[in-house]
């Protein structure tokens, strides 16, 4: 992100060295887009912002109604639904309504004080990102690819704390789930031992995103687990996902996100691809095995004793392609999808057995 601050070089240097103002009764704005998993990170950071500025009025802005659903029980900030056009970086006028502005988008951690910076966006992130991630650029980017800082080897919450001078704790977001009515009032219909599967890789019209693990492998894995343990396998997910079939019980569309959190919390094991349910499982301290191919380490909960990650290391020179390839999310940029296709059922099965035995 380009830093645009008016004045001579010495003025810029002095402004960049000034800390974020801490006076009372500030009006603070925070922006974030994304899905359920992103909302947990946003909540943890918002709570830390409120703790750092307890007398402030805090507003959270997002174009996605997902955040409104997640933050239903929350009362320490106001939610506003605004489009990208309303809060676009080149349109600085909305920022004049705030004393401090936080952008909570990945790799774009920013703060702006209109009083000091004449409504220009002041980035506190670029130098810190270089310090935290290193200058690990891909050497010869092809057309359509982008250069991005680092491999994301630090947990996302740590980067927020370093860049924004906060003390956020990702696990504070557990209270968002446990205080939600759809979690509190829901009775888990599954008794006894069971394993949950979840995969949100279908994007419509026959296309699958780059995190997708082939359905035939899920079915083969289920057969092995049922033979080994005689256990129920339950597929959770949205109604527009594709049923894994075979011996896997299809519960697609029959539970909302918070219902699913309670089911996963009580499972013998949850197996998933990287995404929102893995973040939720970490919060719920559920034993989880995540099949992580193209996603950056940035999103992993390496500090959690409950979540383990299986990565098909060395399968592709672009891994993790999230770190260096534009459009990675919507399909393998090289077309072979080796990082997930070549992750063997046997390897996942052995790791699943270890997780169950360790429980």
Image: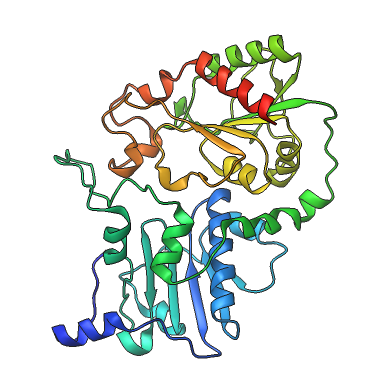
What's the colour scheme?
rainbow
Q: Residue furthest top?
A: 227
Identify the residue at image location x=76%, y=58%.
Answer: 179
Identify the residue at image location x=48%, y=70%.
Answer: 166
- Residue in the foreground of this view, choosing between 222 and 121: 222
Q: Tell me, yes or no, if residue 87 can be seen here.
A: no
Left or right of 268? Residue 40 is left
Left or right of 50? Residue 100 is left
Identify the residue at image location x=43%, y=76%.
Answer: 101
Using the image, determine if residue 66 lies above or below residue 206. below
Using the image, determine if residue 305 lies above or below residue 171. above
Task: Report how many numbered discs are placed on residues in the image.
Answer: 0
- Residue in the foreground of this view, choosing between 300 and 62: 300
Instruction: Assign the C terminus to one quadrant of the image.
Output: top right
Using the image, determine if residue 168 lies above or below residue 323. below
Q: Position of residue 46 (x, y in %)?
A: 56, 68
Q: Position of residue 308 (x, y in %)?
A: 54, 35
Left or right of 21? Residue 26 is right
Instruction: Assign the N terminus to one quadrant of the image.
Output: bottom left
Q: Position of residue 217 (x, y in %)?
A: 53, 15
Image-quadrant location for residue 342: top left
Image-quadrant location for residue 228: top right
Identify the residue at image location x=27%, y=52%.
Answer: 149
Q: Tell me, yes or no, if residue 46 can be seen here.
A: yes
Q: Position of residue 162 (x, y in %)?
A: 41, 65
Using the image, determine if residue 134 lies above or below residue 239. below
């Amino acid at each position: 992100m380009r830093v645009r601050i008016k004045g001579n070089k010495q003025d810029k240097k002095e402004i960049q060295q000034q800390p974020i103002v801490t006076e009372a009764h500030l009006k603070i704005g925070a922006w974030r887009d994304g899905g359920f998993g992103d909302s947990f990170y946003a909540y943890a950071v918002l709570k830390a912002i409120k703790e750092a500025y307890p007398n402030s009025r805090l507003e959270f802005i997002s174009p996605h109604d997902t955040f409104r659903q997640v933050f239903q029980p929350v009362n320490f900030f106001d939610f506003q639904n605004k489009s990208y056009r309303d809060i676009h970086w080149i349109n600085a006028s909305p920022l004049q309504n705030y004393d401090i502005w936080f952008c909570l988008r990945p790799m774009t951690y920013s703060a702006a004080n209109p009083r000091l910076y004449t409504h220009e966006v002041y980035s506190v992130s670029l130098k810190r990102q270089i310090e935290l991630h290193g200058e690990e650029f891909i050497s010869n980017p092809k057309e359509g690819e982008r250069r991005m800082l680092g491999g994301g080897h630090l947990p996302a919450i740590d980067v927020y704390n370093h860049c924004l001078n906060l003390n956020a704790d990702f696990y504070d977001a557990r209270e968002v789930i446990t205080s939600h009515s759809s979690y509190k009032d829901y009775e888990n219909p599954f008794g006894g031992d069971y394993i949950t599967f979840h995969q949100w890789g279908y994007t419509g019209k026959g296309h699958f995103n780059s995190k997708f693990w082939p359905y035939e492998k899920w079915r083969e894995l289920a057969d092995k687990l049922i033979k080994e343990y005689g256990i129920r396998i339950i597929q959770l997910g949205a109604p527009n996902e594709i049923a894994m079939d075979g011996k896997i019980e299809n519960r697609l569309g029959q539970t909302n996100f918070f219902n699913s959190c309670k089911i996963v919390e009580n499972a013998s094991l949850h197996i998933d691809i990287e995404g929102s349910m893995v973040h939720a499982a970490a919060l719920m301290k559920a034993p989880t095995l995540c099949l992580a191919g193209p996603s950056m380490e940035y999103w992993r909960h390496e500090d959690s004793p409950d979540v383990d990650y299986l990565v098909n290391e060395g399968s592709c020179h672009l891994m993790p392609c999230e770190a260096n390839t534009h459009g990675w999310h919507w399909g393998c940029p090289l077309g072979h999808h080796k990082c997930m296709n070549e992750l063997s059922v046997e390897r996942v099965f052995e790791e699943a057995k270890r997780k169950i035995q360790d429980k």
